[in-house]
Amino acid sequence: MKAFQVMYVPIGVPTFHMESAHDQFHKSVALLQSLIPDCVVPAAPLLKLDDLTAYLGTCRPDLVILQNNTFANSAYANEVLKSFEGSVLLWTLREPVIDGGRLRLNSLTGAYSAGNLMHQWGRAPFEYVFGGPQEAKVRSKIKAVLGAARVKSLLRSLNIASIGHTPQGFGFGRGLDSEMARAFGATLESIEARELMNKAKSYQPADLAAEWEESRAKLVGLEKLPAENVEAYVRLYKAYKDFVTSKNIKALASRCWPDYFVDYGTPVCGVLGMLNDNLVAAACEADIYGALSMYIGIELSAQPVFFGDPVSMDEEKNTVTFWHCGTAACSLARKETGSEMGVHPNRKIGPTMEFGCRPTEHAVAFRVGRKPDGSFRFFISKGSVLDAPQQFLGTSLVFHPDSNAEQWVTKSVKEGWEPHFCILYEDVAEELRVLAGFLGMEVCEY
């Protein structure tokens, strides 16, 4: 897989105040290298078209940070667009001095020229930031753009798997390989659940040592469950791990009920929870776009995300409770309980994860949603996860949106959102907004 690459392109002309331009150039390089040490940077601002063209030929970046170091006409931006098809952050520098004298940089007029050209080209939406390299808001914006551009690049090499098909009435999670490739650049693999069940049954006891060791280290109360169910879970975990490794799968959506209860005798819930804990996005009920949402959340937050249904709303506390049967990552469990194990609330067979999730001050509810015309939209809602115990059998958390919870529920139901959401344990709302823009998708904020 090609390494993610960022190129800093400072353009300008030599008729402006070069002392100010070089000062901003060096400060900009310092900022970018503090955020991404291997950022490609030139030795000096690019003040001639020939210099720009030669520099652009040195690499094939995923993200170009196009900065008007001084004013430059649209011919400079035209050379950039001709050279590559990646994402663009257009950066305008603030005028260093306003004293009634000379205009030192005129960066903003240059930005209008570049922005107009990109609009005329019909390129996917570019990102924009205004300000000097020492301003906190500029650093924050560039950091968010870097995160989003990196995930966009990762999506193009993502192998995502559908294990079995969605149950009747759960078609909202069904994905097409052509849609996944067109909209996200990802490759959708498909396998029947029975293939992994059969693989699980084929292992010799000695094959399972690593899975036993990990499970005993992470899971609380495993010894209280029937031994035959626990061994079946360990076998199934091994089968899923081997499949993920052999196919380089980073996200999957698995069939669960009724097959695993009826045909295998043990739920897949605990397996998915363990995969999630190891940062393999694992959604249940074969919700492939739920798994994709989890993958994006994991990559942006660098930690597991919660996957579940909105099942309860409290107007007075302004909260929405999310729940699922028991697939949450072990590391999301509350510290005083740990990742306790139990049985499925309906089928009474285990092991399933059984705990309330730990709190966090900054969280984001997120979902990649499919629209009736086959296009996609991003659900984004900032909030927090409250310090609340397990709400129902299975795994649960209590989300406190920054907005009004009753309006949140009413609007999201009326606007047709899928019943599965992800809760990200990090405020990456800006990264999600930027990623949606880079992918040409609608942002819906709640």
Image: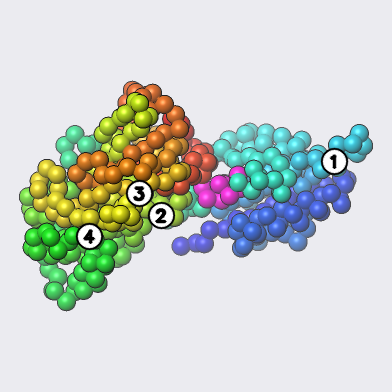
What secondary structure do most residues of the magenta stretch adopt?
helix
Q: Which quarter of the picture shows residue 404?
A: top left
- Crowding at dot 4, Cα within 10 Å, few <14 / some 14-19 / many 20+, comes out as some
According to the picture, the residue beneath numbered tag 4 turns out to be: 220
Task: Tell me how far mark 4 sits from mark 1, CA to CA.
Answer: 63 Å
Amino acid type of the residue tagged 4 in the rendering:
Val
According to the picture, the residue beneath numbered tag 2 turns out to be: 303
Task: Tell me how far mark 1 sits from mark 3, CA to CA.
Answer: 49 Å
Task: Tell me how far mark 3 sits from mark 2, CA to CA.
Answer: 13 Å
Q: Are marks 1 and 3 in contact (CB under 8 Å)?
A: no
| Between discs 2 and 4, the one toward the N terminus | 4
Q: Are marks 4 and 1 in contact (CB under 8 Å)?
A: no
Q: Which residues are magenta?
A: 141-149
341 relative position to 93: left or right: left
User: Which residue: 69% across, 52% down?
Assistant: 9
Amino acid type of the residue tagged 2 in the rendering:
Gln
Find residue 287 and report its horizontal and vertical position in percent.
Answer: 27, 43
Find residue 244 and report its horizontal and vertical position in percent.
Answer: 29, 61
According to the picture, the residue beneath numbered tag 1 turns out to be: 97
Circle 3 or circle 2, nearest the eye: 3
Amino acid type of the residue tagged 1 in the rendering:
Val
- Crowding at dot 2, Cα within 10 Å, few <14 / some 14-19 / many 20+, comes out as some
